[in-house]
Image (cartoon, coloured by chain):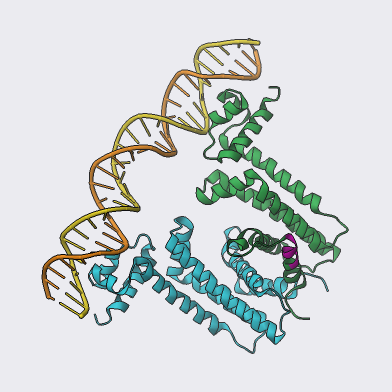
Chain colours: A green, B cyan, C yellow, D orange
Amino acid sequence: MIDRRQNIIEAASKSFTLFGYKATTMEQVAKIANVGKGTIYTFFETKEELFKEIVKDLIKQIREVAVAAIHEDRPFHENLHSALYGILDFRKNHQLAIKITQEVKEMNTPAVREASQMLESAVLKFVKKELEKAIEKGEIKPCNTEITAFLMIRMYVSLVFDWEREHQPLSKEEIAHVLENVLINGLRNH
Amino acid sequence: MIDRRQNIIEAASKSFTLFGYKATTMEQVAKIANVGKGTIYTFFETKEELFKEIVKDLIKQIREVAVAAIHEDRPFHENLHSALYGILDFRKNHQLAIKITQEVKEMNTPAVREASQMLESAVLKFVKKELEKAIEKGEIKPCNTEITAFLMIRMYVSLVFDWEREHQPLSKEEIAHVLENVLINGLRNH
DNA sequence: AAATGACCAGATTAGTCATTTGGTCAACCT
DNA sequence: AGGTTGACCAAATGACTAATCTGGTCATTT
């Protein structure tokens, strides 16, 4: 029990992942972390702050996944595809991310909704930056990067999460193909 | 009180619009329609069937709006824009459509969810047909019309409904502009 | 023959109260 | 003395129940 703070974070993370934000009690976290409940409050002002700390870390991990998917020498659409797909794949497999989305849908806890928005906004910023880089390189034409990033993410989320609600799920390759044809090349018949 | 059936439909429509599906009682409908409760059941098997009848009519109206927006001599993207925008504008202003979306979000009543899906699927079919027509005419290149229609609708809904959750709402012209640049022409720098 | 509303079983709701929980702080180690 | 703790509190929660409501039926009325 050397680093009590880290200990608490790990315990809380476990509990949030397992039971969600609302169903996690501070006493539960204290027990898992092997500390008294009061100790938690010497490191974190509130339950919410503790949660935010963990979400911040989650966002950091996501950014790492995205950055790792980018190779400066590859064409823009390939990079964007692997980055976005990586992000969504991470989110699809990361238990805490799943719990957050679940909880925001079925109980709409304010703190959880806020966390979810922060997550979204981090991804938006990332895509926007990539768009700007691509425009500067001349790979794509100038456009409103805010709206375009927003749309691209929506499309990706739709393809990865929503499409399979009523259809066969799409493979990574199919999604890449759709992205390139619809978004990059455009539908127009040249 | 000549056409009792129509009378009931109108009363139910009023009530569904005002209070939503769940909060509408058959007795309420009977009272508004000036008939006995039993009479409703001589025309409609269940509350759900009555609701579906009304939704069917709503879909018909939407189709009319969309069809009216199409002019065969205009380019594909203009038609699609005015049709989709017309649909969403209708939906945004039609009280019953609003109630349905609200209710499916906050109570998720099965009958209402189903109605919402039927609505969506009707729009999807419409856009898909328009895409096929445009491909045949050679206006756009061949593509998976199902996925593409799905994506276009998602994009439109995102732009019209979701974007303004955290930004200035977009004008009709801005949306048309984004549609043409992102979807039709593509982002690639030629 | 068509329309009706009293009626019923099952669902929903309002109200209650005991339990739980986030957060505090005086006592307690070390 | 400074960090740690768990008993403690007000507020929130949720389990439970009684009362009400509602979709649907059907014997009676018109």
Residues B185 and B131: in front is B131
User: In the rendered view of the protein, which quadrant contains the N terminus of chain A?
Assistant: top right
Residue B101 place in picture, x, y as percent:
48, 63
Q: From the image, give the main secondary structure of the stretch colored magenta.
A: helix
Say if the magenta span includes residue A156.
no
Residue at (37%, 60%) from the top-left corner?
A: B22
Q: At x 59% / y 79%, what residue is drawn?
A: B82
Position of residue A33 relative to residue B163, above or below, is above
Along the viewing direction, whichever of B174 and B35 lies nearer the viewer: B35
Q: Quadrant of residue A52?
A: top right
- Residue B86 image position (x, y, % from top left): 55, 76
Q: Residue at x 57, y 78 (%)?
A: B126
- What is the x, y in percent for residue C28? 55, 11
Whether D11 is drawn above or below A96: the answer is above
Tell me the residue at 51%/79% (across/down).
Answer: B63
Instruction: State which region is magenta.
Output: A172-177
Residue sitting farthest toward the bottom = B73
Residue located farthest toward the right when viewing the structure as drawn: A73
Residue D15 in picture, x, y percent from top left: 38, 37
The image quadrant where one finds the C terminus of chain A is bottom right
Q: Nearer the viewer, residue B164 or D13?
A: D13
Task: Please name whichever residue, A120 or B175, is drawn nearer the observer in this view of the structure.
Answer: A120
Question: Taking A134 as reference, is B64 above or below it?
Answer: below
